[in-house]
Image: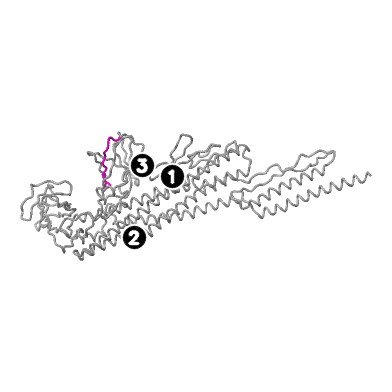
């Protein structure tokens, strides 16, 4: 037995050739997305004994592995999810911010123009041209709010479409990952190319939602979304789907299904682009829409109420300029009924006090144990409501009518008091003479004692005892809570009557009382004069009056606060993008430092293995020369 130089040289050539192949493959895939660098592990063949010594018999490539760090890959997936969520939020918020900055600027401008036109009517109350211009300003104001609501509705539809598109792509990835798992189970997870493809798909999936990867003994990997939804289990793939929104159909939900079983998913736990889109729709778009509706209700109610306090150019009590706030076209979408409700009760919402509205949404629930409970979705405050006849009255500026049948234990309803108002706002007045510029004159008797005062809310000419051109005097006793009304000549319109709270509604006059005192008299002069501008002056003053949000904001501030809030959210989202991008880049660099292809390093390896190949080939040449020499020596 002797040392087999030819065989040793052969193994060296084969090993060097394998190393060159791996190195060449790395260089060729240096720019391939998702490629993980490969390394060949070279080992020695078993030695043989010659005499008292052991001699090597050559080498071989024992393994070819991908350079892969599971912890670094997991860190990269987490970074990808956070960055995708931040970028999506910033993109959507930037779009909305631009809408409010460009299209939305016409809303406060139109409102200011309308107030200015009312001020012009106050200057020349009999000028029909100025009155016509004022109605045109009102129409522009309504059209601006209609258009703004249309833009918000368009954003909702676009967001829903993006959610559906992402869901479709997730299903495609789910099927591909299931097929890849089948291949990996055949090779026990040893095929590097398939593993690279799997990792690339998982990394893409982490853009859409948070991903948890669970390695299996079979070589496959199970994939979970959001920590709660098993998307892929071995070769079995689950599909994601979109279902009709509940209780509002235009707000679709996301679910996961396998076989005949379907599970609704909480989007707040998904993260990634999906979580960001749901958060944008539910936490930004919908509040912006309800606050826009709050402004529309404020505008309609404020000016319609002022109309009822004055006289138009025909000498009649003013009629509505805008559509009534409780008109069905203004009340569309105020109530949503949960699909799980077993009762047949139908709910409708009536706005009682626009100034008490907050722009929030509520959940109304009924249980036999606790009765009717109203929960503010913004603050979490729970109020117990008492059913009086068919009506539930809240302290939030609205009441709920219960009709249609019995309510069942556990039934729930979504209440959005301001929904639909911005889309339904419309000018219903067509005659410019209808603007109620004139107003009654209120005087208090010189003999009044105490600090009692009254403020007019509205007038109704259809009630007996009311007559334009006359006067009506109310004598009040705030100690006994009684009143009595008299004509201009002192004739009583009826016996003394009591009132509750601080409001009197009698003989066509509705007014509030503040202060206290006995035997106080207040006279309303209902005489009409074409040049009278009392009511128009009061209308114009409302631009600076805090009418909204329980007396804390003006009409304009409702819109401006929404605009500022969206701008603030956009700025915060921009900061989050920068932070998330930095974290992602750090994770990416770490993965690349371990698994990426370094061309300088591979070029050095190429030279090294080339030299090794040439040296092994030289051994073969040397062995041949020795063999030839031996043959020549015995001839």
Which residue is the site of mark 1?
268
Packing grade of label 3 (10 A; few <14, some 14-19, many >=20) is some
Say which quarter of the image contains residue 65. Answer: top right
Q: Position of residue 397 (x, y in %)?
A: 26, 48
Measuring 63% from the left and 45% from the top, which residue is drawn there? 66
Measuring 68% from the left and 50% from the top, which residue is drawn there? 23
Q: Is residue 164 left or right of residue 483?
A: right
Q: Is residue 313 left or right of residue 160?
A: left
Circle 1 — which element?
helix
Circle 2 — which element?
helix
In the rendered image, the vertical position of residue 414 relative to residue 473, given as above or below: above
Q: Is residue 512 left or right of residue 291?
A: left
The earlier-in-sequence mark between 1 and 2 is 2
Q: Position of residue 583 (x, y in %)?
A: 52, 52
Badge 3 vs badge 2, beta-carbon distance below 8 Å: no
Which labelled disc corresponds to residue 247?
3
Q: Which residues are magenta?
A: 394-407
Say which quarter of the image contains residue 570. Answer: bottom left
Measuring 8% from the left and 50% from the top, which residue is drawn there? 493
The CA distance from mark 1 to mark 2 is 34 Å
Is residue 446 rendered magenta in the image? no
Which labelled disc corresponds to residue 106?
2
């Amino acid at each position: 037995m002797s040392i087999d130089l030819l065989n040793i040289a052969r193994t060296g050539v084969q090993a060097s050739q394998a190393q060159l192949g791996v190195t060449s493959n790395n260089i060729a895939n240096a720019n391939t997305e998702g490629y993980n660098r490969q390394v060949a592990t070279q080992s020695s063949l078993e030695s043989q004994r010659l005499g008292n010594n052991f001699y090597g018999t050559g080498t071989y490539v024992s393994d070819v592995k991908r350079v892969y760090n599971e912890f670094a890959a997991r860190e990269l997936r987490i970074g990808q999810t956070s960055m995708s969520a931040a970028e999506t939020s910033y993109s959507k918020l930037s779009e909305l911010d631009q809408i409010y900055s460009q299209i939305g600027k016409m809303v406060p401008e139109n409102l200011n123009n309308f107030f200015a036109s009312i001020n012009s009517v106050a200057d020349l109350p009999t000028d029909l041209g100025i009155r016509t211009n004022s109605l045109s300003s009102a129409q522009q104001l309504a059209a601006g709010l209609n258009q703004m609501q249309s833009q918000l509705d368009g954003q909702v539809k676009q967001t829903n479409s993006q959610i559906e598109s992402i869901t479709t792509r997730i299903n495609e990835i789910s099927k591909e990952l299931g097929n890849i798992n089948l291949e990996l189970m055949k090779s026990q997870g040893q095929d590097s190319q398939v593993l690279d493809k799997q990792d690339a798909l998982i990394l893409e999936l982490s853009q859409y939602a948070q991903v948890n990867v669970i390695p299996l003994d079979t070589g496959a990997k199970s994939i979970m979304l959001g920590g709660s939804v098993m998307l892929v289990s071995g070769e079995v793939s689950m599909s994601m789907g979109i279902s009709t929104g509940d209780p509002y159909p235009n707000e679709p939900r996301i679910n996961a299904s396998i076989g005949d079983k379907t599970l609704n998913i909480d989007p707040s736990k998904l993260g990634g682009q999906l979580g960001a889109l749901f958060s944008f729709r539910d936490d930004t778009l919908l509040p912006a829409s309800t606050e826009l509706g709050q402004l529309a209700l404020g505008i309609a109610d404020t000016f319609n109420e002022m109309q009822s306090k004055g006289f138009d150019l025909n000498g009649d009590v003013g009629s509505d300029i805008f559509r009534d706030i409780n008109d069905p076209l203004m009340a569309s979408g105020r109530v949503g009924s949960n699909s799980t409700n077993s009762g047949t009760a139908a709910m409708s919402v009536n706005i009682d006090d626009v100034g008490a509205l907050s722009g929030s949404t509520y959940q109304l629930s009924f249980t036999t144990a606790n009765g009717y409970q109203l929960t503010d979705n913004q603050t979490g405050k729970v109020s117990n409501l008492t059913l009086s006849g068919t009506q539930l009255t809240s302290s939030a500026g609205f009441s709920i009518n219960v009709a249609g049948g019995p309510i069942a234990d556990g039934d729930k309803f979504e209440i959005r008091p301001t929904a639909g108002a911005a889309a339904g706002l419309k000018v219903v007045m067509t005659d410019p003479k209808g603007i109620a510029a004139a107003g009654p004159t209120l005087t208090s008797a010189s003999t009044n004692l105490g600090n009692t005062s009254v403020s007019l809310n509205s007038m109704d000419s259809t009630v007996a005892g009311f007559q334009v051109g006359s006067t009506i005097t109310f004598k009040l006793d705030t100690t006994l809570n009684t009143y009595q009304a008299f004509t201009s000549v002192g004739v009583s319109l009826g016996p003394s009557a009591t009132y509750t709270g601080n409001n009197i509604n009698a003989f066509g006059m509705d007014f509030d009382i503040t202060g206290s005192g006995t035997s106080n008299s207040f006279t309303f002069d209902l005489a009409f004069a074409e040049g009278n501008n009392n009511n128009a002056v009061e209308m114009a003053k409302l631009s600076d009056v805090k009418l909204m949000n329980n007396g804390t904001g003006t009409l304009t501030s409702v819109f401006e606060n929404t605009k500022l809030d969206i701008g603030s959210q956009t700025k915060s989202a921009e900061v989050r993008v920068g932070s998330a991008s930095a974290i992602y880049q750090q994770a990416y660099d770490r993965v690349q430092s371990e698994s990426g292809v370094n061309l300088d390093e591979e070029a050095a390896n190429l030279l090294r293995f080339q030299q090794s190949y040439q040296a092994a080939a030289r051994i073969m040449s040397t062995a041949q020369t020795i063999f030839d020499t031996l043959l020549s020596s015995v001839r």
